[in-house]
Image (spheres, helix red, strand yellow):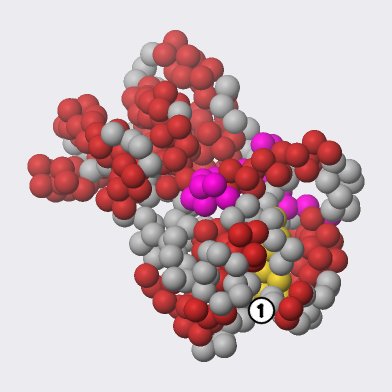
Amino acid sequence: MPLERLIDQSRARILIERMVQDSRLPHALLFWGPAGSGKSVAAIELARWLNCREGLAGPCGQCNSCIQFKSLEHPHFSYILPLPGKALVNSEEGELTEAGASELSNIFARKAEEPYGSAVYPGGQYILIGQIRALLQWASKRSFEDLPRVALIDRADRLREEAGNALLKLLEEPPPNFILVLTAQSQEDILPTLRSRCQAVEFDRLRTESVERFLTRHGQQETDARRLSRLCGGDLSRGLNFASQPQVADEFHELAINIVRHSLGRNPIEFDALLEQWNHLGLADQLIVLEITATWLRDAAVLQALGPQAVKRLMHLDRLELLEKFVVNCPEADFAAAVAKVDEACQHLEGNALAPLTLLVLSRELYRAVYHRKPV
C-alpha cells in the first residue's frame, strides 16, 4: 500500500497519492509542517513507490528496488541534510571526507531502520553550496529503466543563500524523470524563489494518542509512553529520542520548568546554576528545552481559562499539582504573551544569538508577562 508508514496524515497522503495516480506529480514538492510529523518519511515512501517494479500497485517490498530502499541505498534516491563544513573535503564541492561519509552512512542506516527517527549530522547547521553542486551533477545523470530520480532536501530552511540560488537552476530547468522534495516546518522558512516553484503539501501535528501507541508498540511501558508522548508535543522523532534516553527527557523537562520558576524568583544563585546548566547544552537541545517550556506555559493558559475541565487537554499531567499551584499563584499572568516570548527566544537562537544572553532576556520577558512589571 502506498505511503503506508505515514501516521495521522490522511490529508497529505490522499493528495500525494492522487497526484501520482493521476500522473500530475510535479517536479518539485514542499512538504511542510511540525517537526517529527513524517515529512521525510513521506518523501522516502514516495521515492520507494515510484521506483517499485509493480508500478502504481506498489510498493511491493519484494523487488530489488524496494529491497535497496530498505537501507536507503538506492541509485535513484539522494538524501541531503545540513552538514558541517568539516564533513566535506571542500565546502565549495560535494565530495565527502572519509569521516563524513562514514558518519552519514551511519545516520542513513539508523533512518532506514526507524523512518521516524531523526536524521541529524552533529554540528550540521546549513546545507552547503557544495552539496547542491553535487546534487546538480547527480540529477543530470540518466535514470535506469526510465524510473524517476528523487532527491530529498531535509530541513530546506537551512539552505545557505548561495546554495538556494544554485538549487533554483534545478527548479527552473528540471531534468527529465527527476523529482525534488523539500521539507520545512513552515512555508515561510523557504526562500520565496524556491517556494513559488514547489507544490506545497501540509502535514499535521501528530496526535498524542498516536505517538503513545507508536511508543507502546516499540517496547515502552504504557505509563512511560503516555508521559513521553505528552512531553514530545507531537514530535515523534523527539519521542523516540526521549524513549532511548529517558534520563535526558527528565532532565530537559525539569530544566524547562525551572526556566519559568527561576525567571519569576529572586534568587540569583539559583538562576546562575540554571544558566550554567543551560550553557552546557548544544543549540538543538536548547531549542527542545524551550519548546517544552512553551508547552508548560500553554498548559498554564489552558488551565487558567478552563479550570478543572482543562485536565484532559494538558500535556504535563505528571506535574499537575505544580502546574495548578503555578496558575493559582499568578492570577494576572498573560501566559499567551509568555509563550510568544519563548517563541521569540527560539528564533533568536536559530539566528545565532548568544545563548546566555537569550536566556537572560527571556527571563526578564517572562517576569514581565506574568507580573506585568519589570523585574527588580
Quadrant of the image for the C terminus? top left
Q: Amino acid at mark 1?
A: His
The boundaries of the magenta stretch are 112-130
Q: Position of residue 221 (x, y in %)?
A: 28, 34
Depth check: give the residue in front, 117 or 309. Answer: 117
**Residue 199 lies in quadrant:** bottom right
- Residue 349 in view, yes or no: yes
Quadrant of the image for the N terminus? bottom left
Q: Would you call the spot at circle 1 few (<14 residues within 10 Å), some (14-19), or many (20 or more)?
A: some
**Residue 222 lies in quadrant:** top left
**At numbered mark 1, what does the secondary structure look like: helix, strand or loop?**
loop
Give the residue at x 42% y 13%: 270
Identify whether 192 is placed above or below 282.
below
Question: Is-magenta flag for residue 89?
Answer: no
Give the residue at x 43% y 65%: 4
Depth check: give the residue in front, 74 or 123. Answer: 74
Identify whether 33 is placed above or below 261.
below
Q: Position of residue 12 (x, y in %)?
A: 44, 71
Identify whether 110 is placed above or below 154.
above
- Residue 171 in view, yes or no: no
337 vs 320, left or right, is right
The residue lying furthest to the left in this view is 308
Give the residue at x 78% y 43%: 101
34 vs 310, left or right, is right
Please name the predominant secondary structure of the magenta segment in the image.
Answer: loop
- Give the residue number, with chain letter if any, for mark 1: 27
